Image (cartoon, rainbow, N blue to C red):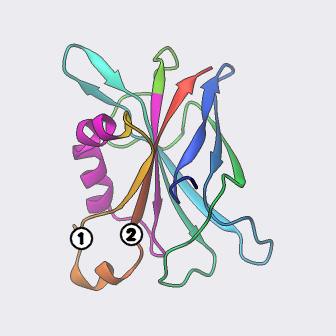
Amino acid sequence: MNPPVYTATGNYSNPNILNLDLCIPAKDANNPYVFDTYDMSKSVANNEQINVVFSHVMKCTDGSSEWTATRYDLHLDIDIPISKKFPGGNNFDPNNQDAMYVLFHNNLEVTEIELQWVYDNIETLYDKVKTGNFNMYLPDVSNSERMFFPKRIGLSLTAKN
C-alpha cells in the first residue's frame, strides 16, 4: 500500500535535526519547491507539550491541482530550533519522544487564519495522527476565492532517534 500523499517519515536527533522523507513529487530543478517552516509546538494539559513543525510548501510555478506521489522520494532536513515561531507557541523540546510534522500544500502564501486553524486544532490532529499518517483538506477558513486551491495537509508523527 502506498503512503498517503503529503505525509512524511523520519526522526529527530541531536544535533537537533529533523530528518524527513516526504511523499510528494520528486524534485524538479526547473520548478523547485519553496518551503516556509514554523515551530508550532504547544503546551497542553498536565504540563505536557506537543512538538509541532509546520511547513507550507509550494513550487515556484504551482497550478491549482493536488500533487500525486506514491513514495517518500524527497529528503528534507530541518534544523531545530526553527527560526520562525508561531506567536504564543513554545520552543520545540528535543527531549520529547515524538513530534508531529504538518505539511501544508497551497499554491498561495499561507495566511495567518490558516496557521491559526492548525494551531487551534493541534490536540485533535495529534490524537488522530497517533493512529497513522494521513492527509486531509484544510477547511475553508479564509475567504471564498481561496477555496479552489489544493489546501491539502499531510500529518505525520516522527520519533526521537
Residue farthest right in this picture = 29
Name the amino acid type tagged 2: Lys
Quadrant of residue 161 within the rendered picture: top right
Q: Which residue is mark 1?
A: 140
Say which of 9 and 91 sits in front: 9
The answer to whether residue 79 is left or right of residue 49 is right
**Residue 146 in magenta?**
no
Q: Secondary structure at mark 1?
A: loop
Q: Can the viewer see residue 84?
A: yes
Q: CA distance from mark 2 to mark 1?
A: 9 Å
Q: Which residue occupies the extreme left position in the image?
A: 45
Q: N-terminal of the two: label 2 or label 1?
A: 1
Q: Is residue 88 visible?
A: no
Question: Residue at the spot x=33%, y=22% of the render?
Answer: 49
> Which mark, by number, is residue 126?
none
Chain part drawn in magenta:
99-128
The image quadrant that residue 61 belongs to is bottom right
Q: Are marks 2 and 1 in contact (CB under 8 Å)?
A: yes
Q: Secondary structure at mark 2?
A: loop
Residue 129 shown left or right of residue 66 in the figure: left
Amino acid carrying label 1: it is Asp
Q: Which residue is mark 2?
A: 151
Q: Position of residue 62 (x, y in %)?
A: 57, 80
